[in-house]
Image: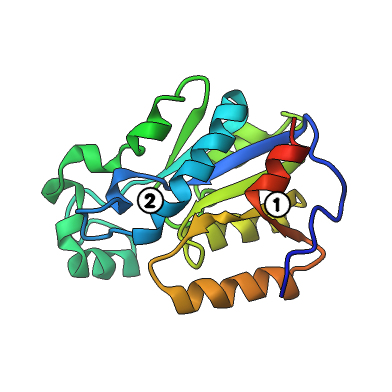
Amino acid sequence: MAARGLIHGPLGHTGLHICVDMQRLFAPGSPWSVPWAQKVLPAIEELVASHPQRTLFTRFIPAARPGEAPGTWARYYERWAEITLANIDPDLVELMPTLARFVPPAKVLDKHVYSPWTEGRLDALLNGSGIDTLIITGGETDVCVLATVLGAIDRGFRTVLVTDAICSSADATHDALMELYRSRFSEQVEAVAMEMVLESWR
């Protein structure tokens, strides 16, 4: 299904770009490498460069050690013991270098689960800010981007998903989620290409 464009009009000064988890943890050479991340990185970099002060980067921070996480996350980190902070180069949690250079004025929000909303800091940052539109890029389409989008929808934000600036390590679920975003959430998610976002958000 083709994107329908910015059906709710141009993007204005009340927008915030949330770039989800574009970290070295997902770059080539990491056990969690997302090959598509390198393909979407130039488009994300262009958007950040156009609005660095209106960009928020999220970072996924793994558990400190295997088993040191609540509930089923403990089992998750037994499976992914090699990704815990005790076992990785600490630089892997940092943003990809071409994006890190924009901080500041861009901001960084750390999270320990898929959703940036769960721990409350994103709500605190946005409350009273006047921001009513979230422009979302990053990875992965079917995990942390999904959690970010659903939280934005639930809170009533205008949600713009940049179709050529999100990525996943699984083609089938990426494609399935794109169909979901465009069909089941067609009134609440505007799925558009980066070119349209750059033209509209000036």
What residue is rendered at 36% in x and 37% in y? Answer: 95
What residue is rendered at 55% in x and 49% in y? Answer: 137
The answer to whether residue 176 is above or below residue 113 is: below
Q: Position of residue 14 (x, y in %)?
A: 77, 33
For disc 2, the neighbor class at 10 Å (few under 14, some 14 to 19, many from 20) is: some
Look at the numbered disc 1 and give the secondary structure of its residue: strand
What residue is rendered at 69% in x and 39% in y? Answer: 198
Residue 179 in sight:
yes
| Relative to 96, 177 lies left or right | right
What residue is rendered at 21% in x and 60% in y? Answer: 31
Which mark is in front, 2 or 1?
2
Q: Position of residue 25 (x, y in %)?
A: 28, 49
Q: Quadrant of residue 34?
A: bottom left
**Count of numbered badges drawn on the protein:** 2
Q: Which residue is mark 2?
A: 38
Q: Which residue is mark 1?
A: 160
Q: Position of residue 53 (x, y in %)?
A: 59, 23
Look at the numbered disc 2 and give the secondary structure of its residue: helix
Q: Please report contact status of discs 2 and 1: CB closer than 8 Å, yes or no.
A: no
In which quadrant is the C terminus drawn? top right
Label 2 – label 1 distance at C-alpha: 21 Å
Residue ranking furthest to the left: 87
The residue nearer to you, when weighing 145 against 51, is 51
Q: Amino acid at mark 2?
A: Gln
| Relative to 183, 114 lies left or right | left
Q: Position of residue 175 (x, y in %)?
A: 55, 75
Q: Amino acid at mark 1?
A: Val
